[in-house]
Image (spheres, rainbow, N blue to C red):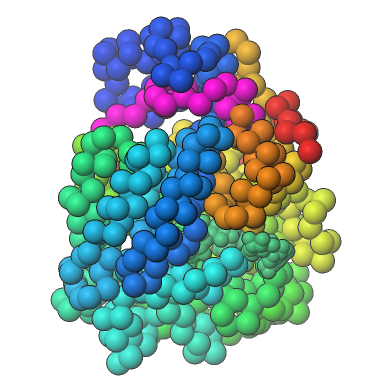
Amino acid sequence: MVRHPLNKYLLRNSHTHSPSLYTSHYSVLKGTKSSKMGTSNPNMLLNYVPVYVMLPLGVVNVNNVFEDSEGLKKQLLQLKEAGVDGVMVDVWWGIIELNGPKQYDWGTYRSLFKLVQECGLKLQAIMSFHQCGGNVGDIVNIPIPKWVLDIGDSDPDIFYTNRSGNRNIEYLTIGVDNLPLFHGRTAIQIYSDYMKSFKENMSDFIESGLIIDIEVGLGPAGELRFPSYPQSQGWEFPGIGEFQCYDKYLKAEFKAAAAKAGHAEWELPDDAGSYNDVPESTEFFKSNGTYLTEKGKFFLTWYSNKLLIHGDQILEEATKAFQGCNVTIAIKVSGIHWWYKSESHAAELTAGYYNLQDRDGYRPIARMLTRHHAILNFTCLEMRDSEQSSDAKSAPQELVQQVLSGGWREKIEVAGENALPRYDAAAYNQMILNARPNGVNKNGPPKLSMYGITYLRLSDELLQKSNFAIFKKFVLKMHADQDYVEDPNQYNHVIIPLKPSGPKIPLEKILEATKPIPPFPWDSETDMKVDG
Ligand SMILES: OC[C@H]1O[C@H](O[C@H]2[C@H](O)[C@@H](O)[C@@H](O[C@H]3[C@H](O)[C@@H](O)[C@@H](O[C@H]4[C@H](O)[C@@H](O)[C@@H](O[C@H]5[C@H](O)[C@@H](O)[C@@H](O[C@H]6[C@H](O)[C@@H](O)[C@@H](O[C@H]7[C@H](O)[C@@H](O)[C@@H](O)O[C@@H]7CO)O[C@@H]6CO)O[C@@H]5CO)O[C@@H]4CO)O[C@@H]3CO)O[C@@H]2CO)[C@H](O)[C@@H](O)[C@@H]1O
C-alpha cells in the first residue's frame, strides 16, 4: 500500500481518532490555514520536510557551563535566516546528575533553551545517557556521572565487556537494566527519573512549543545498539567489531536462557574474531560459519532480543514521563553499512542488528516502536554506495532503503541524520532523495516522505561562506521550495498530546516482523536537486 500522509496520520492515531482532529487536519490539507512567514502553495507544503541541525557536542561543557552564548546566538540566527526549523542538542546525564543520585542541575540548559527560543528555532532534546568520547567525531569528553563510574570501580561488570574482558564505560550494560545496583535504583529507574525531572524542569519550554521532540538515548552514541565498534579500543573502519555481552550479568542471563532452551552446555561465542577482522577470517562469520548453526542462531536471537527489550522498557518510561505533552518520542538506530553486502552481515550482527538476506533485523525494532507511538531516527542518509571502498562490501543506499521501508511498513514515522559531516551537493542530494524517495507531488502529499532530517552538525566549517550557501539550498529543497513554516500542522505534522504506551506486544509477535518484505521502490535521483 502506498501511504498518503492523511492515511498515515489516521493510522497512527486510529485508536484515538476523533472527528474534531479529522476536521482540523482536513482544513490543513485544504490550505485554509496560513503560514506566519508568508508563502505558499498548500499542496506543495504537504511535501515539506523539516530540517534540524545538531548543536556542537560541548555547547554546555563538562563543568555545566554554557561558555559562548554570544557566539552561539550569532550562529543560531544564521541558521534561522537559512530557514532551518530547529536544532538538536545532547542533554548529558554526566552533566545534569553529576553531583549525586537525583541531584539534577538544569540551570545551564535552561539558559541554552531560552536562547534557542529567542532565536525562533524549535528544539529536539536527546536524553544522552551515554558518554561523549570514543566514537567518530567526538571532539569532547563527557563521561557518565562519577558516582556511577565509582560503582564501576568495585563492580566493573556494570559496563559492556568484550570477550577479552575490556570494559566499555560509555554506557551501562543492558545486563543491569533491572538490577538495583545504583544506590538502590536500577538503570531503568535512573533513566526514568531523569526524564521525569527533565519534563518537570522544562515544562514551560514544552508548553510553549519550543521542545517538540525527545530523542531517548538507548546506548552508545545515543543509539539502540551494543558498543561493538569502539575507536577507544582500537576498532577501525571497516572492522567487523565484537560482541559485547561478556559482563557477568549478561553472561548469567545467557546461560539461564540456554539452559531453559535445553542447552545448558552452550556458551557465549568464542570464535567471532576481534575488532578489525574481516568476516571470512572468523569461524563465526565465515561462509557457512557458526552464525548459521542452531547454537549460533540461538545466540544471535538472544543478543538482538536484548536490544528490543531494552528499548521497549525505556520507551515505556519515556511515554509515562512525557504523557500529555505535545512532543514526539524518537530513538536512534545506527547506520552500519559495512559488510552489508556480505553473507553474514558481521558488523550489523555484532552491533545487535540480526539482519541477513532472509531475516530482517530492523523491522522488529520498528514494530516494537509502534506501541510507544515513537519515531525511528536512522543515520547514514548521505552515503552512496559508489563512495565506499569495495573492501568493506558496504551498501548504505540499500540499508537506508530497507530500514526506512521497514518503518513505513509498520506504519511508524521515520526520521534521519547524516553519519559524517559533509558539505557537498552529492551528499545533500542523497539526503533529499531519502527524504522523499519518489519525489514531490505537486497535487498533494508525496507517496513517501520522512518526518524530518537532522543535519550533523553546526560548526564554523558549515557556516563558511560557500558551504553555507549550498546548505541553504539544501534546506530550501527539503522544504520543497517553500518558505520556512512555523506551524508544523501546515506541513502535515499534527502534533497531539503524547499517549501512554499501548499494550505490550508479545516478543513472538514482534519477531514475526523478521520476515523480509521487499522495500519500497526509490527513484535513482531526487527531483529537487541542490546544484553544486
Ligand atoms: O550529538 C548527537 C550525537 O552525535 C554523535 O553521534 C553521532 C555520530 O557522530 C554519527 O556518526 C552517527 O553515528 C553512527 C553512524 O550512523 C554509523 O554509520 C557509524 O558511522 C561510521 C561511518 O558510517 C563509517 O563510514 C565509518 O566512518 C569512517 C569514514 O568512512 C572514514 O572516511 C573516516 O572518516 C573521516 C573523514 O573521512 C574525514 O573527512 C574526517 O572527518 C572530519 C571532518 O573532516 C571534519 O571537518 C570534522 O567535522 O570532523 C570529522 C570527523 O567526524 O575524519 C573522519 C574520521 O576519521 O573514518 C570514519 C571513522 O572510521 O565509521 C563510522 C563509525 O566510526 O557509527 C556512528 C557512531 O555510532 O550518529 C550518531 C548519533 O547521532 C556522538 O557520538 C553522540 O555522543 C551524540 O549523542
Q: Position of residue 258 (x, y in %)?
A: 42, 75
User: Can residue 312 be seen in this snapshot?
Assistant: no
In the rendered image, which quarter contains the N terminus?
top right
Is residue 450 positioned above or below 30 on the image? below
The C terminus, quarter of image: top right
Which residue sits at x=72%, y=72%?
279
Depth order, front residue of 188/233: 233
Query: How far across and down, in percent of the image, does residue 448 sit?
Result: 58, 28
Can you tell which quarter of the image residue 308 is in?
bottom left
Looking at the image, which residue is at 63% across and 82% down?
A: 234
Is 530 placed above or below 24 here? below
Rendered-image quarter of ligand 1: bottom right
Residue drawn at the location 26% of the way across and 40% of the way down: 206
| Left or right: 462, with 152 as reference point | right
**At which x and y percent is residue 109?**
31, 56
**The stretch drawn in magenta includes residue 283:** no
For the point 67% across and 72% down, which residue is it?
240
Give, as a single range, the part of the protein colored magenta.
477-497
Residue 135 location in percent, x, y? 56, 70
Q: In the rendered image, is residue 477 in sight? A: yes
Q: Is residue 452 above or below residue 216?
A: above
Left or right, 190 with respect to 468, comes to: left
Can you say whether 240 is above or below 48 in the image? below
Main SS category, magenta section: loop
Residue 495 lies in quadrant: top left
Find out whether residue 479 is within the magenta segment.
yes
| Count of marks placed on residues | 0
Q: Residue furthest front?
A: 70
